Image (tube, rainbow, N blue to C red):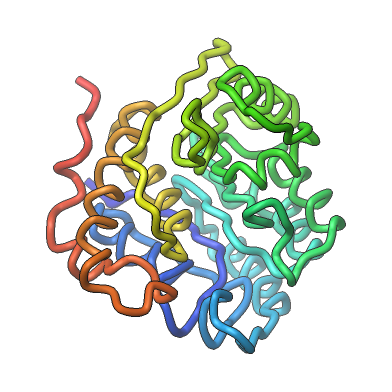
Amino acid sequence: MPHPKVLAIHDLSGFGNTSLMAIIPIMNRMGIEVTAMPSALLSANTDYPDYILQDNSELLKKSLTHWKELQLSFDAVYTGFLGSPAQVYLLLENLPSLLKKEGIVLVDPVLADEGKLYSCYTWEMVEAMRSLVSISHIITPNWTEAIFLSGYKNGKDLKTVQVYECCKKLAALGPQNIVITSAPNSQGNFSSVAFFAAKNNFFREFECNYAPVIFPGAGDCFSALLLAGILNGCDIVQSIEGTIAFLQEAITISIPVVQDRKTGIDLISALKKDPHLFYSHKE
């Protein structure tokens, strides 16, 4: 059987286990062939001060044209960090012709965290990202990105019902499946994963073991593992469960050994164990 093929469009940070530096080894370990396109080149991930960023829009534009000339088609497209609204509109124009008939578009709408936009973005990027979200099958925002995209008011004393309402607003933009990471739970921790399927109005929260540490790139790993699970035959709930289980173990492994946590999760150690073992497949 041929390996599933994924087009992954994300930044490439030369130093640190984030973005494409995390996505490619995860996907390969899960038996998935990756065609990678850096939306931007960075000297190091953005948790480091004075990082150097080079926009890659011209190469992206030419590559999309070349892939269409080669008649390439992909089982899934995964988008993460994008360098500008212009890149978003470039993808809107070109992605449909690169996707197989039953293909999946997963958009990780990288925009913000901890209540504020990343320094490289303005609200114009949020508006552009809403357009990309509209053609997706799955989106994986964190809680800040979810409320910015949906326009939901982020009040105090958040409960499950507020997360559900935010999911419905996101679904109105077009995606079939909403998966929110770092979602608030009843204990006041932003450590749950919320899932909403628009087709049957299905909502579920998945509690995660709260760890008071931050590893850059954990969201990139989450989205890559989620999509990999689905392409390996899991339904989306099974894939969420497997992704959470693997990442919790990966973070547990990383805490005592990673001295500079800005580098991200220790994927070399974590991927020594086969990620497939964390996923239960459909019969």
* Residue at the image position 44 percent from the left and 54 percent from the top: 6
Q: Nearer the viewer, residue 84 or 117?
A: 117
- Answer with the quarter of the image where residue 118 lies: bottom right
- Answer with the quarter of the image where residue 26 lies: bottom left
Depicted 36 relative to depicted 202: above or below? below
* Residue at the image position 74 percent from the left and 70 percent from the top: 119
Q: Nearer the viewer, residue 171 or 253?
A: 253
Q: Where residue 78 sits in the image (x, y, percent)? A: 52, 52
- The answer to whether residue 111 is left or right of residue 74 is right
* Residue at the image position 80 percent from the left and 52 percent from the top: 128
Q: Where residue 111 sits in the image (x, y, percent)? A: 68, 57
- Quadrant containing the C terminus in the rendered view: top left
- The answer to whether residue 3 is left or right of residue 91 is left
Tell which residue pokes out farthest to the right in this image. Answer: 124
* Residue at the image position 58 percent from the left and 82 percent from the top: 41
Tell which residue pokes out farthest to the top in this image. Answer: 200
Depicted 84 relative to depicted 108: above or below? below
